[in-house]
Amino acid sequence: MVRKNVSMEDTHLKKLRPFLDKNNGNLSAAIRDAIELADAALEGHESVEDALEYFTEDSAKYPEMRNNLIENGECILISQLSFRWFIENTNGILVADELVSELFNPYRIKSLPELLEYMNKRSTNHGWGIEASLINWEEDKTEVIMLEHGEPSLRAFIAEALSIFLGRYLSFDVSFVQRKSNSILIFLKDYKSDTEIPPGIRKNFGTLDYTFKEIKSRPDFWITLVERYMLHRYERINLNKDAFEVFLSGGVPDITSFFETFTGKAIWEIPLSELFVICDEVISVTQLASEIERTSEGGNMYLKIRHQFSDEKVILKLVELFSKVFRAAGYAFEVRTISNLIIFEFAGAS
């Protein structure tokens, strides 16, 4: 055992009082207990200063703030597992405007730097552990918000709420979102809108938002429809009333308006490659065919449509349905049928 002389002032002795009481006034035993406690406290911290800052600031302030929020009913405790389930199962549904306004006060925040400063302060006060910063992407000088650290599900939720605030109040849209294991990058672009959420935010965060709202508005209809499709393994045809009426009368409907609405262009302005993409969309939505395949050979382009019809008259109507579109768009083609396959050939269109 090594014996050393230790000099201490009254303030240090007062801090040792709990250890002295525990050890019946034995100073050596009290110091040994204090050392053991200090060793445990230093675990997970890079330095003594780091540990002191953590225990004298964050741990003193955060529990008090947390308890106050719980006592006044503003917040509740929820397990990380429950919160993660909630976030993952509402993915694609946009965070409500009133919740965004509650997280980030639109009356106090008037610029992007103010938003990030407010975000970081709130993260510190609420123990989120998320850090927000603004960087310039070197390739094209795009402004990018980086969210780092924190629980991944919470980080994803904050990224969405932050983006909606940018679209609603600061005239920004989101062109791209890059998600990494410990960070999220939000690529920004200018956008002016007083009412609608910008399209980039809806694309990156709200792909199911309209769908979910429609299901909630008519749950009986959509639940029954989904059950029917599942029961019949999606072997059902989905057509609007006008097209169905034309089929019932023995004719073939003109669906060029669908292509024009989808692209925002007149039918003759749509490139052939884009027409093929929309044909795939038509087949996916209507279930008129099983699949569509695009190939090229010898300078010619081929569109192959597979179906499950056996009646020759029905097959000819399906051929005419798509032929009307290609003729209206001004493309010359030849078409032939082989069993359950319809092949459109476009010369010199590869």
Image (spheres, rainbow, N blue to C red):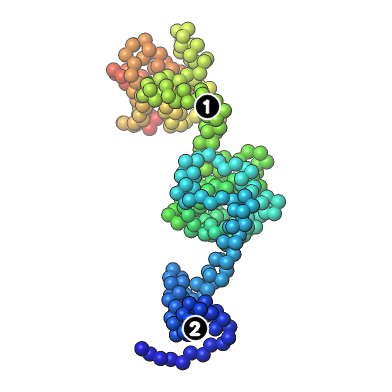
SS class of the residue under badge 2? loop
When the figure is inspected, residue 333 is found, relative to residue 72, above or below; the finding is above
Image quarter of the C terminus = top left
Number of callouts in the render?
2
Report x, y in % for residue 169.
66, 47
Q: Of the residues shown, which amino acid type is indicated by label 2? A: Gly
Image quarter of the N terminus = bottom left
Q: Residue at x 57, y 62 (%)?
A: 62
Residue 234 in sight in this render: no
Q: Which of 328 and 7 is in front in this view?
A: 7
Q: Which mark is residue 219?
A: 1
Q: Quadrant of residue 198?
A: top right
The residue labelled by disc 2 is 25
When the figure is inspected, residue 322 is found, relative to residue 184, above or below; the finding is above
Q: Residue 73 carries which label?
A: none
Q: Neighbour class for label 1 at 10 Å: few (<14), some, many (≥20)?
A: few
SS class of the residue under badge 1? helix
* Tag 2 and tag 1, C-beta contact below 8 Å: no
Q: Which residue is drawn at 59% across and 64% down?
A: 61
Distance CA(mark 2)–CA(mark 1):
73 Å
Q: Neighbour class for label 2 at 10 Å: few (<14), some, many (≥20)?
A: few
Report x, y in % for residue 165.
62, 48
Report x, y in % for residue 137.
52, 56
- The first of marks 2 and 1 along the sequence is 2
Report x, y in % for residue 183.
47, 55
Q: Quadrant of residue 317?
A: top left
Residue 94 in sight in this render: yes
Q: Residue at x 53, y 51 (%)?
A: 77
* Residue at the left extreme, as displayed: 339
Asked whether, in this view, residue 161 is left or right of residue 283, the answer is right
Q: Of the residues shown, which amino acid type is indicated by label 1? A: Pro
